[in-house]
Image: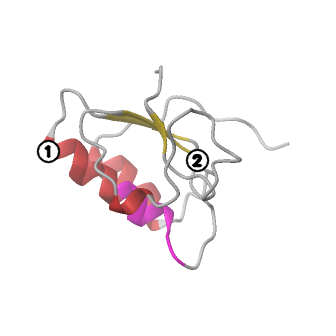
Amino acid sequence: FGPFDVDACCDAKGMNAQVKRFWSDCLVQQWRGLTVWCNPPYTSETTSIESILRHFITEWRADPESTSAVFLLPVFSSARWMRLIRRSGMRIVHTYPRG
């Protein structure tokens, strides 16, 4: 699924970055033409998993041939964003058991 061009959800200094290039505010970035690693905050006052997924889908639709992302997400089966994943055509590649 890699190599990744950018880590989308890092702190401002990139201390938690998994890739050399990183963003601390992925919602204002253009994802088109990139392979993005994204481990979004599971709770946040300023952003949400759903808004990040919606932003990615918008960017992907603008350039589906060269835009991709891998998201590391919790399995919250009742979350609205889980339905968004299913409806958008994204696929769940792997799940990890609790613990």
Q: Contact (CB < 8 A) between labels 2 and 1? A: no
Look at label 2 and name its amino acid: Asn
Question: On the rendered structure, is 17 left or right of 57?
Answer: right
Q: Residues within 10 Å of mark 2 (few under 14, many from 20)?
A: some
Residue 48: in magenta span: yes
Please tell me whether residue 35 is drawn above or below residue 48 in the rendered image: above
Q: Residue at x 79, y 44 (%)?
A: 98
User: For the magenta stretch, what is the residue range?
Assistant: 46-53
Q: Which residue bears the numbered disc 2?
A: 39
Q: Mark 1 points at which residue?
A: 62
Q: Earlier in the sequence, mark 2 or mark 1?
A: 2
Query: Residue placed farthest to the bottom in the image?
Result: 45
The residue tagged with tag 1: helix, strand or loop? helix
Measure the C-alpha gap from mark 2 to mark 1.
22 Å
Tell me the residue at 56%/57% (across/down). 77
Amino acid, disc 1: Ala
Task: Report x, y in % for residue 35.
Answer: 38, 31
On the image, the x and y values in percent for residue 76 come to 60, 58
Q: Is the magenta stretch mostly helix, strand or loop?
A: helix
